[in-house]
Image (tube, rainbow, N blue to C red):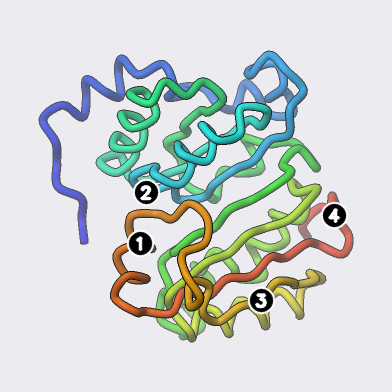
Amino acid sequence: MRARKKKWAEGELTANELLITEPERYKGAWREFFGNGNPLHVELGCGKGRFIAETAADNPDINYIALERERQVIISGLRRARESGVKNIGFILADVDRLPELFGAGEIKKLFIFFCDPWPNRKKWAKRRLTHGNYLKIYKMLLNGTMHFKTDNRELFEFSLEQFSGNGWNTGDVTWDLHGGGAKGVMTEYEEKFASAGVPIMYCEAAPIDPGSSPG
């Protein structure tokens, strides 16, 4: 569903200092942007920003980047983070395909992919899934740590586990019902809605066996 346009959107995009307008300038130098050597955690598809803003507020000794491609969606995250006063966060309006332009080899310590578009499991569409092997090759180059993945789509979860296994990633902490025994961790808006309705949320962590290797 396309996000509804908000009257205050352009003003937020123009005035919010947390939006990084030339992120490619900091490739390999995000320590300079944040002014410290703290670890860098990145969320792909931050949506309305609840997870990334609350997590950043709880962890001031970690730097966070929220990447979102939808203009009408990122503004909600920008406003949430601005109003909370969190400083260890930056937002980038860009598609995931631009990651190699934005981050250096091994620069990311944690990567979060929560509730990405599941896309139909057909050859021409499956390649768009953010856990497809083509994307995993890119993440492997940029990540020196772990990926954290959540979905409510069982088919996507099974597909993702297969992709991790077949593309040189180890998986751990695999669960098919993350909140079955009670809520765990900071949830996205989408996650809270469906978990409270009894929809199982699947989760796993994954780490490249050979981090820092280039795609190709």
How far apart, in angstroms, are the residues tagged by discs 2 and 1? 14 Å
How far apart, in angstroms, are the residues tagged by discs 1 and 4? 32 Å
The single residue placed furthest to the left in the displayed view is 7
The 10 Å Cα crowd at callout 1, few under 14, some 14 to 19, many 20 or more, is some
For the residues carrying marks 4 and 2, which lies nearer the camera in this image?
Answer: 2
For the residues carrying marks 1 and 4, which lies nearer the camera in this image?
Answer: 1
In the image shown, does 139 or 157 lie closer to the viewer? 157
- Asked if residue 149 lies left or right of residue 146, the reply is left
The image quadrant where one finds the C terminus is bottom right
- What residue lies at 42% left-to-right and 24% top-to-bottom? 19
How far apart, in angstroms, are the residues tagged by discs 3 and 4? 20 Å
Instruction: Name the residue tied to disc 2.
Output: 47
Instruction: Name the residue tied to disc 4.
Output: 211
Amino acid type at mark 2:
Gly
How far apart, in angstroms, are the residues tagged by discs 4 and 2? 27 Å
Mark 2 near mark 1, Cβ–Cβ under 8 Å?
no
Sooner in the amino-acid sequence: mark 2 or mark 3: 2
Instruction: Name the residue tied to disc 1.
Output: 192
Sooner in the amino-acid sequence: mark 3 or mark 1: 3
- What residue lies at 72% left-to-right and 41% top-to-bottom? 108
In this rendering, the answer to whether 69 lies above or below 201 is: above
The picture places residue 140, in percent across and down from the top left corner, at 76, 56
The image quadrant of residue 80 is: top left
For the residues carrying marks 2 and 1, which lies nearer the camera in this image?
Answer: 1
The picture places residue 144, in percent across and down from the top left corner, at 80, 47
In this rendering, the answer to whether 74 lies above or below 45 is: above
How far apart, in angstroms, are the residues tagged by discs 2 and 3? 24 Å
How far apart, in angstroms, are the residues tagged by discs 3 and 1? 19 Å
